[in-house]
Amino acid sequence: MDSQRRFSVQTRLFLLTALFTWILTFTFFALQYSREREYKTNLLDSRLQRVNERVLDHIAAGDSVTPALIDSLSSFSGDTVRLSLIDFNGNVIFDSGKSSSEIGNHKDRPEFKEAMAHGHGFTRRRLSATSNREYFYSATRGKTLVARSALPYNHSLATMLQADPVQCYAILAVALILTIMAWFATHSISRVVKKLRDFANEAEFGDISKYDSSSFPDDELGDISRHIVNLYKILQSTADERDRNLREAMYEQRDKERIKHQLTNNISHEIKTPVHVIQACLETVENNNLDDDTRKSLIDKAYQNVKRLTSLLADLSVITRISDAPDQIQLEPVDVTAVINRVADDMKVFPPSRQMRIHIDVPEGVSVNGNLSLIESIFRNLFTNAFNYSGGRDVRVAMTDETSDYYTFTFADNGIGVPPEHLNRIFERFYRVDTGRSRALGGTGLGLSIVKNAVLFHKGKISVENQYNGGLKFTFTLHK
Ligand code: ADP
C-alpha cells in the first residue's frame, strides 16, 4: 500500500534522468541559439560595415553621396539601406531617409559612440527617434566622418537573425530519443529492483529454498541480487535448522521428563511392595505370640524383601549414574576376558537345578578402555537372566569380530527365548516378560536396561534376537 502511494523506483529514476537530460538539452540549446544569433548579427554587421567603408571611400575620393550610389551599394533582400553621415560631434550631415536639418544630434547613439571608440559599432534593434521605426544600425568611423547604415528591423530581418529552426528540431529530437532511452534503461534497472522486492515478499511469507535466481540479468546488479538471494537462502536454512534443533531438544526434554515421571512411578511402585511386606512381617513378629518356625519364616521373608530392596537400589543407582552423570564415571583399561571368566565363576552359587554349561570363546587379553563395574554388570545381568529365565542347558559367550575400534561379542543360550511381541521392549526399564517369575527370582526389571546403557556408555550397540533353534542371542559391541 505504501509503495503504491509513493513513486516507484523506476518513476523516480526516470524522472531524474529525464530532468537531467532536458536541463542539459535546454542549456545546450540556449547556448547554441545565442551563438547562432550572434554569428548572424555579426555577419549582417560586417556586410553593413562594408557598405559604410565603401561610402567613406567614395567620400574620401571626393564623390558626393547620391541616392543612386546608395542603391548601388546596398540592397538587402528588397530593403534599401538608410545611410547617415555623422561628423565627429554627432551632427548628422547627411541622411538618405530624411533631411539632415530635421535630425537631432547623434552623439548619444550607442553605435556612434562605439564607432568613435573602436572604429565600428552596431545596435541590434533600436527605435529611430527620427523616423519612428526600428532599425539595425552599423556605424564605421572614417577619417572625418562616421558612416552609419541602417536596415529596417522588419519581419524578414528578424527571421533572418533567428537561429535555424531545423537545428532546434534536431536538438529536440535528440532530447526525445535520450528520454526514451532513459525510460528503457530505468525500466531494466527497476525490473531487478521489482524482482528483488517480490523475492523479499516471498521470503517474508514463504519458503524460498527453491527460488530461482537465474532470471536476474547477467550484470553487476544481477550478481548482487543473486548474492542476496543465496545469502538469504543460507540464512533461512540455518534458521530452519536452528528451529528444528530447538524442536528436537524440546521433544527430547519432554521425553526425558515423561520417562523420569514414569520411572518415579515405577520406582515408588517397586519399592512399596517390599516395604509393605517387610512392615507386615515385622509387625506380626512384634505383636503376636508366634512359634519359632513361623517367626523364623516371617523374618526370613522380611530379609528376602530387604535383599530385593537392596538390589533394586543398587540397580537404580547404576542407571542414574549412567544417565545423569556419565562424565563422572571413571575410565580405565579393563580386561574383558578376565571379567567374563570371573562372572562365569560366580554363577556357581546358583542352585544345581538352575545351573547351565558355560562356553567361553573369548581370546585372552581382550581389553577395552572402560569402566570395570559397568562391564561386569553387562555380563552379570546376561548370565543371571540366562540362568533365571532361559530354562536352557547351555550358555555361550564369544568374541566374534574385532576392528581397529571395536570388539563384537555374542551372548546366547539355548532356552525358551522371548515371545516376539516382547522382544523390542525387554531393554526398557522395569519391563518384564513374566512379571511373577521375575519378581519371584528377585529380578528388578532393570537388568537389561543396565546392560543396554552400559553398552551405550562404551560407545557400542546392542541387539537381541530369538535363535532359529531356540534361545535368546544378544549381539553387542564395545569400543576399545
Ligand atoms: P530383571 O532385572 O527383572 O531380570 P531384565 O530387564 O533383566 O529384568 O529382563 C527383562 C525380561 O526379559 C525378564 O523379565 C525376562 O522375562 C526376559 N529375559 C531376559 N533374559 C532372558 C533370557 N535369557 N531368556 C528368556 N527370557 C529372558
Image (cartoon, rainbow, N blue to C red):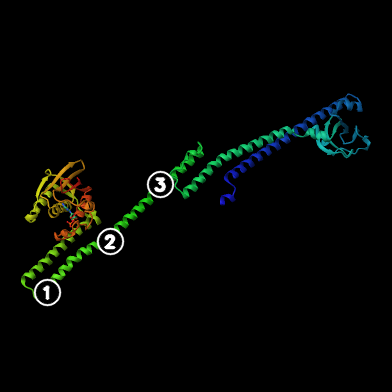
Give residue 158's position: percent from left, percent from top. 80, 35
Observer-nearest of 400 and 163: 400
Identify the residue under disc 1: 286
Res. 114 in view:
no
Identify the residue under disc 2: 261
Give residue 48's position: percent from left, percent from top. 82, 30
Looking at the image, which residue is at 73% across and 35% down?
33
Q: What element carries label 1?
A: helix
Looking at the image, which residue is at 47% across and 47% down?
203
Please tell me which of labels 2 and 3 falls first in the chain. Answer: 3
Say what amino acid the circle numbered 2 marks. His
Res. 221 in view:
yes
Cβ atoms under marks 1 and 3 closer than 8 Å: no
Real-space Cα distance between discs 2 and 3?
35 Å
Identify the residue under disc 3: 237
Say what amino acid the circle numbered 1 marks. Glu
Give residue 239's position: percent from left, percent from top. 40, 49
Please tell me which of labels 2 and 1 falls first in the chain. Answer: 2
